[in-house]
Image (cartoon, helix red, strand yellow):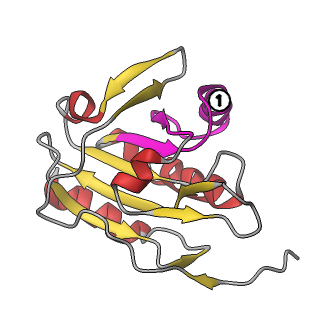
């Protein structure tokens, strides 16, 4: 059994319900290719579940995307992820899980910083990634639901996400 310590994270300064989520442009990866895209162009297509996750291959990322797949969130809303992983790593993640999702590549964690959810990895000098976070966004980037991890590791409240999607979509 893996032995790890649960760590409390400092308070986040993330966008909350009713606020407008920050816009950004980064490489957006789908199952076939990637290209620069803005969040505003993505959400203009319809309600979007914006999900920040640790680097691809980390166990929390695997659990998050497996649960999203099992619940079929991508059948009801656009599902878009953000992590520090490269487009190449995202391509592998999309082949294994994250069915129907697209993934933004944010290697410098600038988007995580703009959302106030950056997390410096213990023991890895200079490595910052987003803490797990989920935002349900309307077409104008208004936040309808927000969940941000307050400890490491932590996982989204999947039933709450499901309820938010049912209520707002």
Q: Viewed as shown, does residue 101 lie left or right of 167? A: right
Residue 82 placement (x, y as % from top left): 47, 44
Q: Is residue 85 above or below residue 66?
A: above
Q: Viewed as shown, does residue 28 lie left or right of 160? A: right
* Residue at 66% over, 84% down: 6
Mark 1: few, some, or many residues within 10 Å (few <14, many ≥20)?
few
Residue 60 placement (x, y as % from top left): 63, 61
Q: Viewed as shown, does residue 1 lie left or right of 115? A: right
* Residue at 59% over, 56% down: 128
Q: Is residue 98 inside the magenta stretch? A: yes
Q: Secondary structure at mark 1?
A: helix
- Please give the residue where the numbered disc 1 appears in the rendered image: 95
Residue 110 placement (x, y as % from top left): 44, 46
Q: Is residue 53 above or below residue 116?
A: above
Q: Residue furthest right?
A: 1
Part of the protein shown in magenta: 79-107
* Residue at 54% over, 79% down: 151
Residue 16 location, quadrant:
bottom left
Considering the image in quadrants, where does the N terminus appear?
bottom right
Q: Is residue 1 above or below residue 162?
A: below
């Amino acid at each position: 059994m893996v032995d790890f310590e649960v760590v409390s994270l400092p308070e986040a300064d993330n966008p909350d319900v009713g606020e407008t989520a920050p816009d950004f442009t980064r490489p957006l990866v789908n199952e076939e290719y990637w290209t620069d895209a803005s969040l505003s162009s993505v959400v203009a297509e319809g309600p979007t579940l914006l999900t920040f996750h640790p680097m691809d291959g980390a166990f929390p990322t695997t659990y998050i995307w497996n649960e999203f797949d099992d619940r079929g969130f991508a059948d009801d809303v656009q599902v878009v992820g953000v992590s520090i992983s490269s487009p190449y790593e995202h391509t592998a993640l999309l082949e294994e899980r994250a069915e129907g999702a697209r993934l933004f590549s944010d290697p410098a964690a600038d988007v995580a910083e703009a959302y106030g959810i950056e997390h410096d990895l213990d023991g890895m000098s200079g490595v910052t990634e987003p803490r797990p976070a989920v935002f349900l966004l309307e077409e104008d980037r208004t936040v309808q639901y927000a969940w941000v991890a307050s400890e490491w590791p932590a996982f989204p409240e999947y039933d709450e996400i499901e309820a938010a999607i049912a209520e707002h979509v």
